[in-house]
Image (spheres, helix red, strand yellow):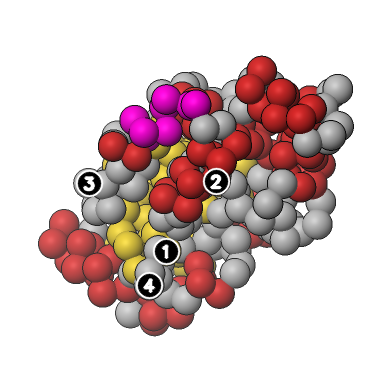
Amino acid sequence: MLKVKQFRYNLDNLSYLIYGENQALAIDGGAIKEIFSFIESRNLNLLFVTNTHKHPDHTSGNSELLNRTNARLLRYEDIINMGGIELEGQIVNVYKTRGHTDDSICFHVDGILISGDTLFNGTIGNCFSGNLINFYHSIKKLMTLSVDTIVYAGHDYVHDAMNFARKLEPDNKYINVFLNNYRSEHIFSTIMDEMKVNPYLRFNEKSIIRLLKKNGLPCHTEWERWESLMSIE
């Protein structure tokens, strides 16, 4: 069974290692010092280095990780062609989740989703690709995962996310629960948690529909509700 280790770097970026008994895969490996320390302590062989997307705050560790190991860089095109990544006989599934960027991908293994800047804990990323409908379909895809799937995001934006969620749904009692469970040393949620507090997964909730109607925003169809939510600042 593969495991996942989270590492924090910069102010709010998050790196990940997927690893087994001997082999490891680094995703958004900016936490270089911490990653090497962990690899050495477990006597792991870093086989692959890859990213959830190409933004420089996520790719900043690639060169050093590659230069100091025999790891192979897996680019977006490589991963899509492979259809997944094999590590110690197990497949790490990869989903195309275009929206934040056109090359955004998520990694899914053993009930854990590494979601980059597609899905944060409590919110979603900006739509830098400009294609809202792609982003909508990506979020819909992630919403089909098991509700107990653990979400490991690309940044720790939890407090800002909950401030915005409370602005939209001030009576949502789960927001306080979400914040009470927050730990800066280990940032995660589940798909069920997201369904309870993340406005961008709650576009079919009556409270969200009432809010959109109150603000005179289109809300007749699911797509209209999504698009309207994306317009609120």
The answer to whether the residues at label 4 and label 2 have Cβ atoms under 8 Å apart is no
Q: Determine the CA span between mark 3 and mark 4.
A: 29 Å
Q: With respect to residue 28, does 162 lie above or below?
A: above
The answer to whether mark 1 and mark 4 are in CB contact below 8 A is yes
Which badge, 2 or 1, is on the more N-terminal residue?
A: 1
| Amino acid under disc 3 | Glu
State the extent of the magenta-drawn residues as a range: 171-178
Q: Please give the count of numbered marks on the rendered protein.
A: 4
Which comes before the other along the chain, label 3 or label 2? 3
Query: Label 1: how many residues lie within 10 Å, few (<14), some (14-19) or many (20+)?
Result: many
Kindly identify the residue that appears in the image at 81 percent across and 51 percent down.
131
Q: Residues within 10 Å of mark 3 (few under 14, many from 20)?
A: few
| For marks 4 and 2 on the same chain, the one whose residue lies earlier in the sequence | 4
Is residue 174 one of those drawn in magenta? yes
- CB contact under 8 Å: marks 3 and 1: no
Please name the residue shown 52% across and 61% down the image: 51
Farthest residue, direction top = 206
Q: Which residue is mark 1?
A: 13
